[in-house]
Amino acid sequence: MNRACGILLHPTSLPSPFGIGDLGDAAFAWITMLKASGQSFWQFLPLGPSGQYGSPYHCACSFAGNPLLVSPQKLGERGLLTKSELAAYPALPQDRVDYPAVAREKEKLFRIAFGRFQEQDELLAFCEEEQSWLDKYTLFCALKKEFGDQSWTSWNGPLRLCEQGALDSYGKQHGRELLYHAFVQYVFYEQWAAVRDHAQSEGVLLIGDVPIYVALESSDAWSCPDLFEFDANRNPVRVAGVPSDYYSETGQLWGNPVYNWDALGKDGFSWWIARTKKMLQFADLLRLDHFRAFESFWAVKAGSPTAQDGAWVKGPGMRLFEALRLEIGSLPFIAEDLGVITQEVEALRDEAGLPGMKVLQFAFDNNPDNPHRPYNYPFDSVVYTGTHDNDTTAGWLNTLSGPDRARVDEYIGSCKPAAVDDLVRLAFSTTADLCIVPLQDVLGLDSRARMNTPGRSEGNWQWRCAKADFTRQKLARVAEFAAIYGRNGPDKQG
């Protein structure tokens, strides 16, 4: 990778009149702004159907797109919605995402659009091409509604157990409903393809994100139980999390079912290969979330109140990455190697040939060997001021006092206290091949713009960029930094 830079912004944070950022005009304008500001990369969070509280890391399907990202505006341009129907959309908050309200109001429009959709041959061709995952996903969506959004673990026997006869019978009775959910995915795929085509025309590369785990409430867990550690009744035996860490003294209990890696490996990790290929339809590079779990993962007995009483269990290691390399060639991954990192994890990352992540907010302790200190960076790494799990840099600086703040100020070397702009400049100046800065830090926003607080289930993933801040002028400083530190230009795009 050549020396380059980019900005982290999830599409839900884009401006739009529909209560959530989506794949409408703002997504195209954003890519054009990146290009004009010397940025070669747009990084975003997982694009799958988000969970109850909007978390993109609790996807309802590993292969589907998030329906909430579908643009009603683009449906209107296709003649599937009228101007009056779009204008009648209620006034939802513009500074944050109200996920239940957006889901409710967008579904109304999507069902109207579906009723007008005439290109049945194209939709049926999409269904056939994506059949390997789409059939079960559409059934899962329809059945969730049928059972009042209850967990699939509480459905009646044959449907809970995903028995083909019961599914066939249900499908015959509710074929139109299944086709509706397929239509929404068809539109998502179509709209995202247009966004990606625009990015390619502008020379902007896309960095996607692959969650290490799937949600228990997913079509993956429901329809492919052999891939996970389930008991005979399809209840999780162990669930995922992490032990005590930077974010929580009691660890983080995520609750996702952990993989049965022995079962996954028996057919050469075909499910992971298919998942990776699908994600590469959406992006040029992929951030591998919680990379350390591929070496060893923290498994907690299902039903435990916290993540404290878990154990490290060996993951698939290089067997998985060798299988992926045979299928896709050079591995287009960034390893999210944060948290409790051992020599074994570092060895796996290096053997796989993946760049790791460095975070400036982790850099300023008393340890001169801290891998997040800029003078310790290898070239083959990606530097961030902070990630979606961190406070904004302004918010973080406001929490520092005494020795911690002094170390930041000393490192910056200014006669005045360090500001957000100084940390952004520092990230651009490092030897790391790639520099990615969250838009919140580009704009200098405080803790009110934080995207996620790990360990808190509600109130996350809601931040949206104000329309007044969505201008090329707001990116002027990072454009300057890209030029000063040799990260811009067509020959700097990786």
Image (tube, rainbow, N blue to C red):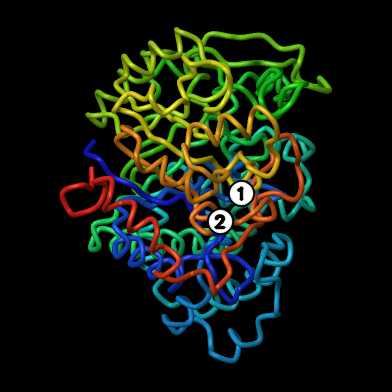
Image coordinates of residue 475 in percent, x first then y, are 41, 62
Element class at badge 1: helix
Kindly give the residue lying farthest to the front in the view shown: 415
Residue 318 picture location, percent across and down: 36, 13
Q: Is residue 480 left or right of residue 182?
A: left
Is 113 positioned to the left or the right of 125 in the image?
Answer: right
Which quarter of the picture shows residue 30?
A: bottom left
Check disc 2 and report the residue beneath it: 444
Helix, strand or loop for disc 2: loop
Left or right position of 211 against 126: right
Per the image, the residue denoted by label 1 is 394
Q: Residue at x 71, y 26 (%)?
A: 252
How far is disc 1 from disc 2 in space, using C-alphas? 6 Å
The answer to whether residue 198 shows anywhere in this view is yes
Name the amino acid, label 1.
Answer: Ala
Crowd around label 2: few <14 · some 14–19 · many ≥20 (10 Å): some
Task: Please rate how many residues cluster around mark 1, counting C-alpha atoms within 10 Å: few if below 14, some from 14 to 19, many from 20.
Answer: many
Q: Residue at x 38, y 45 (%)?
A: 207
Asked whether the residues under the numbered discs 1 and 2 touch, taking CB atoms below 8 Å apart as contact, a structural biologist would say yes
Q: Say left or right for 268 vs 49.
A: left
Q: Amino acid at mark 2?
A: Gly
Assign the C terminus to one quadrant of the image.
top left
Residue 195 position in % (x across, y down): 36, 63
Q: Residue furthest right?
A: 305
Residue 59 horizontal/vertical position (percent) = 59, 43
